[in-house]
Amino acid sequence: MPANIEIKARIASVQALLPIARALSDDDHLPLIHQDDTFFRVPEGRLKLRVFGDGSGELIHYRREDAQGPKRSDYVLTPAPEPAGMREVLARGLGVLGRVRKTRILVLVGHTRVHLDQVEGLGDFMELEVVLQPGQTEAEGHAIAGDLMRQLGVAPGDLVRGAYLDLLLARDGG
C-alpha cells in the first residue's frame, strides 16, 4: 500500500513561498490544480471524492494520525469516471461530513510533493508529502520532511493538526 510522510503548515502567502519552493525543484512544470473534495462518513480513516477542475475525479481512502508534526499516511485511490453521480450515491449511502475547495500549486522536490494551497474559507497553507520509496523507512521520510521544512522556513509553530476539513468544521463550530 502506498505511504507518505506528511506535514501541513499555515503560511503567510503562497506567492511568497513559491520562489523558495521553486528554487528547490528541478522541475519547471508547476501545475495549478483546482480540487473540490467531498468527505463522507466512514467508520475508519477518511474517505473523500476529489473532483478536479477538468471534471475528472478520484476516490481516496486514507488513514493518518491527526498529529501536528510529520506523520505517516497510507492510502488507496481509484479513478472516479462519473464523480457527480458517485458523490450523490456516497452522500445518500454514507452521509457527507463536509467539502474542501482549494487551488493548489504542485512543486516536486525529489520524491516529495510540495503543495502550496489556497483553501477556500481558510487561507494559505503548505503541505509536504514525502512519498516513501520501496525499502525507505519512515525515519528517513521524517528526516526528509524536517530538512525541507527548514529549507522552506516552516517553523514548528506553523504546523497544523488534522485535515483542512477539521479546520473548516472547527471554524464553523462543528
Image (spheres, rainbow, N blue to C red):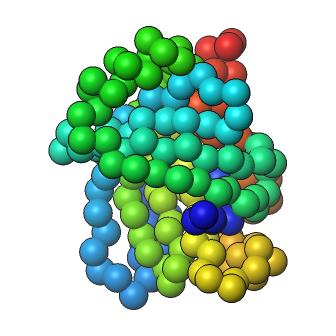
Q: Quadrant of residue 156?
A: bottom right
In this picture, is 1 found above or below 108? above
The residue at the far left in this view is: 54
Front-lying residue, 85 or 64? 85
| Residue 56 visible (yes or no) | yes
Front-lying residue, 154 or 146? 146
In this picture, is 104 found above or below 172? below
> Quick check: 45 left or right of 50?
right
| Residue 152 visible (yes or no) | no
Screen quadrant of the N terminus: bottom right
Q: Give how far across and how far down residue 47 sits, in percent.
A: 55, 35
Q: Give how far across and how far down residue 37 sits, in percent.
A: 43, 35
Tell me what residue is drawn at x 46 percent, y 51 percent. Answer: 77
Tell me what residue is drawn at x 68 percent, y 65 percent. Answer: 5
In this picture, is 86 found above or below 94? below
> Quick check: 84 left or right of 23?
left
Tell me what residue is drawn at x 37 percent, y 35 percent. Answer: 36
Front-lying residue, 122 or 136? 136
Q: Give how far across and how far down residue 14 sits, in percent.
A: 46, 55
Tell me what residue is drawn at x 77 percent, y 47 percent. Answer: 65
Q: Quadrant of residue 26?
A: bottom left
Front-lying residue, 149 or 113? 113
Screen quadrant of the C terminus: top right
Q: Give how far across and how far down residue 110 sits, in percent.
A: 50, 84
